[in-house]
Amino acid sequence: MGVLIVFGYGPGISQAAAERFGREGYSLALVGRSAERLADGVAHLKARDIEASAYVSDASEPSKVRSTIEAIQTISEHIRCSLDRLSKRKRHECAVDKARRYRASIRHRD
């Protein structure tokens, strides 16, 4: 079905959304700053037979978002959507909009 990238993964809304998309057949790429939290998330999802992988990255740094997306693409070129749980203020301050434009440019190449 494709890959869902979950930016800012944590044990709350993003975990619930990841589980839902995983049950629908998406593979999950969990992105966050805490390697331990991501490892716990991957283990949690794999225990539910959901394919997941972890990527330590900071969504507030444009170059890291770009390199993370490129790393995910090396595993699967079928990135279908993304989810972020950043506040409006934080979203404005960080590179999420740039990442969206970057992802949009990737979709136009398909």
Image (cartoon, grey):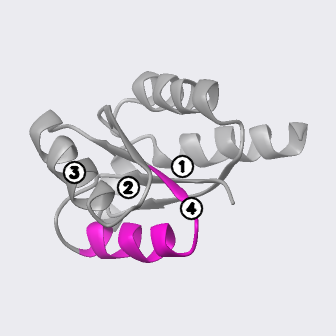
In the structure shown, which secondary structural element does the residue marked by tag 1 occupy? helix
Depicted 72 relative to depicted 84: above or below: above
Cβ–Cβ under 8 Å for marks 1 and 4:
no
User: Who comes first in sequence, dot 3 or dot 2?
Assistant: 3
In the structure shown, which secondary structural element does the residue marked by tag 2 occupy? helix
Left/right placement of residue 13 relative to residue 6 reads: left
Q: Which amino acid does label 1 sit on?
A: Asp
* Image position, residue 64 (x, y; %): 41, 25
Cβ–Cβ under 8 Å for marks 1 and 2:
yes
Cβ–Cβ under 8 Å for marks 3 and 2:
no
User: Who comes first in sequence, dot 1 or dot 4?
Assistant: 4
What range is drawn magenta here?
A: 13-28
Mark 4: give few (<14), some (14-19) or many (20+) Cα within 10 Å.
many
Query: Mark 4 = which residue?
Result: 26
Query: Mark 3 = which residue?
Result: 43
Report the predominant secondary structure element of the magenta stretch: helix
Q: Which amino acid does label 3 sit on?
A: Ala
Rendered image quadrant of residue 35? top left
